[in-house]
Image: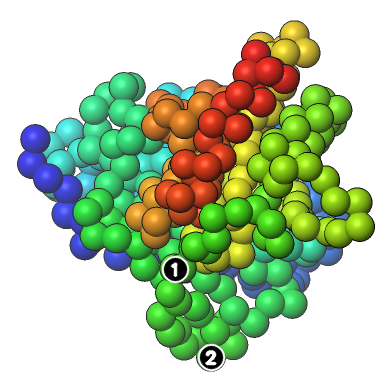
Amino acid sequence: MPSLDHASLLTRLRVMQADMRSALRAHMRSQETAVLSRQVRDDDGDTIFGIDAHVEEILLQHCQEWGRTQHFVLIAEGLDAGGVQFGRPGLGGPPFRLLVDPIDGTRGLMFDKRPGWCLAGIAPDRGPGTSLRDIEVAVMTELPTTRQATSDVLWTVAGDGARGERHDMSTGGAHPLPLAPSRATTLRHGFATVSNFFQGGKELLARLEEAILRRALGGWNPAKAEVYTDQYICSGGQLAELALGRDRFVLDVRPLAHRKLGFSSSLACRPYDVVTSGIAQAAGCVVCDPFGDPLDAPLDTTTNISFAAYANRALADALIPIVRDEVQRHLG
């Protein structure tokens, strides 16, 4: 199969996400929170709110234009589960699959509390078997609150590392943004989070978190605040925090906790939420499943995913055995 044109695909994704960011920013400044947070529809992937629907329109407009010269399949939260075809077979370069989360972190952003991220990844089209590990180009663009003056853009192309820029939302200027994950080999005095966003499994997950921290730190010093948690309701944002050196460890095992409680189908992290995990990996982080094996999943909007992410290899080597043991003990 001919190789994808990485340079042109990267440009397309960056322009598309910049337009989505601009449209969303203008929309947020002109609408009340009640409009942005209204429920529009309930899909298999997640609830779609007013703020999601607005950005979805921009995404589809870009894909329709793109489809005039290229054949590809768009897979995104809120669309048909099988994906939407654009272009026709044989048109343009090699066919590919585009997995997008228009807004990861909707709930924080729609209340203007915290930025979300627009996530996108492209993989050669290998049919329904195409998976996260096939992704060759990934871009993520920060969707700022109305109070923010800057927005970060991070990207990776297979075999070419990870890069970033910080955009000034007032002037339109940009400057390089180094991706420098923490080199710390301990969690002490750093941010480490076991995702525990929503009702369902909170007690189990809290016990798991306490057990991991107790072993990682050799106990608990009640006189000190030694490890901090950040319940950022945005999987892409969590990985960006790692890649940018702000966090050291993230574990999301909500599907395992829900299964332990007897629920085989539940809302948790989906492939579109970690479609840009390759950026953190290219920056030097370790992103894997909770047991230390490679992270992978089909490019769809319904598969539940558990993942673990570590700021660097040394930290991963120290923590993976602890995380594996405690996840098996608490959720196995």
Identify whether 135 is placed above or below 152.
Answer: above
Name which residue lies at 9% across and 35% down.
Answer: 1
Left or right: 87 in relation to 265: left
Picture coordinates of residue 220, whole percent (x, y): 82, 46
- SS type, badge 2: loop
The circle on residue 179 is 1
Identify whether 73 is placed above or below 137.
Answer: above
Query: Visible in this render: residue 276?
Result: no
Q: Where is residue 206, by image quadrant?
A: top right
Identify whether 94 is placed above or below 304.
Answer: below
Name which residue lies at 72% across and 13% down.
Answer: 260
Left or right: 71 in relation to 289: left
Three-letter residue code for mark 2? Thr
Query: Visible in this render: residue 1?
Result: yes
Name which residue lies at 39% across and 56% down.
Answer: 284
Residue matched to label 2: 171
Q: Distance between the residues labelled 1 and 2?
A: 23 Å
Picture coordinates of residue 187, whole percent (x, y): 65, 53
Closest to the camera, between mark 1 and mark 2, is: 1
Q: Where is residue 168, by image quadrant?
A: bottom right
Considering every residue shown, the one lying at the far left of the view is 2
Q: Which of 252 and 263 is in front in this view?
A: 252
